[in-house]
Image (cartoon, rainbow, N blue to C red):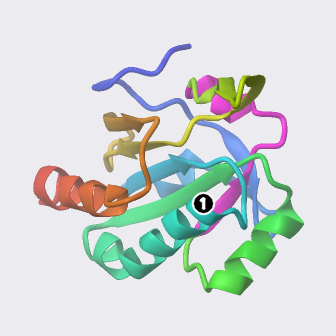
Amino acid sequence: MTIEIGKKAPDFKLLNQNAEEVSLLDYQGKNIVLYFYPKDMTPGCTTQACDFRDNYAAFKENNTVVLGVSPDPVERHTKFIEKHELPFTLLVDETHEVAKLYNVWQLKKTFGKEYYGIVRSTFIIDDQGILQKEYRNIRVKNHVEKTLDYVKNELSK
């Protein structure tokens, strides 16, 4: 299955930071910002998570939930949430199944070394479960603001 703007977003089930199973279908009737990030507690990922935290009320006002996905285990997500007071759900994708489904688990290269990892990406899904926008290989700076602007201007009713 490939993901495509204008089509139904692929559903999945993953554990959250409380080891509870979560599905996209759990959020039917709400817009979803689904963001994939490489690793809890790293500088870029912390900045991104805190930017979502700082704008969380505005997302909520626009009928939008934020879901973060990384390969980190439940315990690490729990620590990350507690340390930075994150008000949204983080999902565990240790097998990279969902990252592969959304085509964000890719070969990367750093200082000549090749490895597989998460390509930082964000998907905006409307309240009907349709993928409306994707941002791939994003830079953290100003990304959350762009995402919020899209939600406010394109999805708010």
The residue that appears at 79% across and 74% down in the rendered structure is: 78
Q: Which residues are magenta?
A: 89-102
Residue in front for this viewpoint, 117 or 133: 117
Residue in front for this viewpoint, 42 or 29: 42
The residue positioned farthest toward the front in the image shown: 111
Residue 98 x/y as whole percent? 67, 34
The residue that disc 1 covers is 45
The residue that appears at 37% across and 38% down in the rendered structure is: 135
The residue positioned farthest toward the top in the image shown: 1
Residue type, label 1: Cys
Q: Quadrant of residue 89?
A: bottom right
The residue that appears at 88% across and 68% down in the rendered structure is: 75
Q: Element under label 1? A: helix
Q: Quick one: quadrant of the C terminus?
A: bottom left
Q: Is residue 119 left or right of residue 52?
A: right
Residue 143 x/y as whole percent? 35, 55
Q: Quadrant of residue 6?
A: top left
Is 94 covered by the magenta stretch?
yes
Is 1 covered by the magenta stretch?
no
Q: Is residue 59 left or right of residue 25?
A: left
- Does residue 112 appear in the picture of this structure? yes
- Does residue 30 appear in the picture of this structure? no
The residue that appears at 25% across and 68% down in the rendered structure is: 62
Residue 17 x/y as whole percent? 76, 67
Disc 1 crowd, CA 10 A, few/some/many (<14, 14-19, 20+): some
Q: Is residue 91 left or right of residue 75?
A: left
Note whether 108 is above or below 121 in the view shown: above
Q: Quick one: quadrant of the N terminus?
A: top right
Note whether 132 is above or below 41 in the view shown: above
